[in-house]
Amino acid sequence: MSGAVLSDFLALPSIDATLAQEVQSDLDRVEDMLRDTVATSDPLLTEAATHLLSAGGKRFRATLVLLAARFGDPYTSELVPAAAVVELTHVATLYHDDVMDEADLRRGKTSANQRWGNSIAILTGDLVFARASEILADLGTDAVRLQAQTFGRLVQGQVLETAGPRQGADPLQHYLNVIADKTASLIASSARFGAMFGRTDQQIVDTITRAGEALGMAFQLSDDILDVASETTESGKTPGTDLREGVLTLPMLHALRDHDPANERLHQLLGRPLDDAETEEALRLLRDHPAMHSARADLRVWSEKARAELATLPAGPPRNAFEVLCDYVVERSG
């Protein structure tokens, strides 16, 4: 699993080369720990538990742990375990998400629920959560408390998404609440873990947490825009997947707010499952719609919120890396 896991943005020329090399070295250690942590005495369970870990992923959350620690001491013994915890937590949620979404693929591979069935997939997610908890037990009560709070938000976000907006509620605000809990919470906690175990000042811990929350929002918005705008699988799934499945994300919600009669056909296509021809039609209509500009404007707002927090942190390669990431999440969406 080790090797090509460094987030793309850390390979950019504007990132300090020494910092990138150090983070990569730590990520390799995280990979080793992930593999060892999910190994069991049962071959089936080991295969299921390593299924998504071996499928790749950029280890984005682990990278944030390691980057945030560099505002303090990046050599403390807790950092690699903390980075493993956030990755295990993220991967565990993917097993459960795929069951709820009835997904066929994850990271280009057959999803666990399709390969082994829903029961095995759910239990495998539970196992991965349990392994994360074992590591947490050695990291202290503050870490356990933070993980419990984060887990509560992850579950709340999934419930909100499953239930949908209440009658009379603003669907766009509901969507933002969902991604705040489902995505931004764990990204914020990743940054907080790094600052905590890097022994930084409390002010830095709190600031990097707020920056991580805003960055997490931007990260998810960027993915949702990419699902419409991209003609490749850069977002980790086939473009138009959300449209095909009838999922309403930021661009679609902005389009639904535009009541111009010219949008009637697009409105007919949004929010319901589509066949191949309808998906292509919806993609074409949405890509040309002003809603895409509105979605990108929202993305920039969250990126700038993160940047404003980062501006108060000590200057140097770690802050620069986070600032480059703010630009990266905007630029990747086109």
Image (spheres, helix red, strand yellow):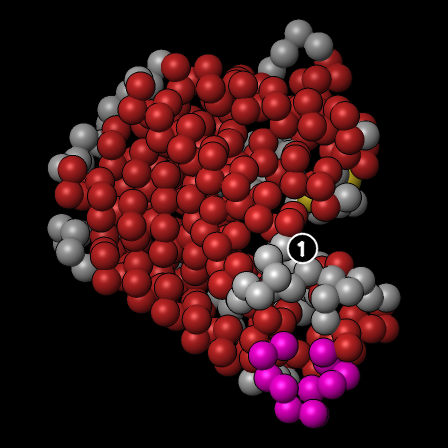
| Residue 304 place in picture, x, y as percent | 31, 66
Task: Using the rendered image of the protein, determine whether residue 66 is visible from the camera's viewpoint.
Answer: no
In screen coordinates, is 185 left or right of 323? right
Q: Which residues lie in the magenta part?
A: 256-267
Mark 1 element type: loop
Name the amino acid type tagged 1. Lys
Q: Which residue lies furthest to the front in this view?
A: 168
Q: Residues within 10 Å of mark 1 (few under 14, many from 20)?
A: some
Q: Is the magenta stretch mostly helix, strand or loop?
A: helix
- Reply yes or no: does residue 259 show up in magenta: yes
Residue, x 68% and y 60% (percent of image)? 247
Q: Mark 1 points at which residue?
A: 237
Quadrant into which the N terminus falls:
top right
Between 13 and 313, the one lying in front of the other is: 313
Residue, x 22% and y 48% (percent of image)? 207
Q: How many labels does the image show?
A: 1
| Residue 6 place in picture, x, y as percent | 45, 44
In screen coordinates, is 316 left or right of 182? left
Eyeballing the image, is 127 above or below 72? above
| Residue 39 place in picture, x, y as percent | 60, 15
Residue, x 23% and y 56% (percent of image)? 310
Eyeballing the image, is 175 above or below 46? below
In screen coordinates, is 71 left or right of 264? left
Residue, x 36% and y 50% (percent of image)? 213
Task: Using the rendered image of the protein, determine whether residue 123 is visible from the camera's viewpoint.
Answer: yes
In screen coordinates, is 127 left or right of 72? right
- Reply yes or no: does residue 315 show up in magenta: no
| Residue 281 place in picture, x, y as percent | 78, 78
Q: Residue furthest top?
A: 41
Q: Quadrant of the rendered structure where residue 140 is? A: top left
Eyeballing the image, is 179 above or below 293? above
Q: Quadrant of the rendered structure where residue 307 is? A: bottom left
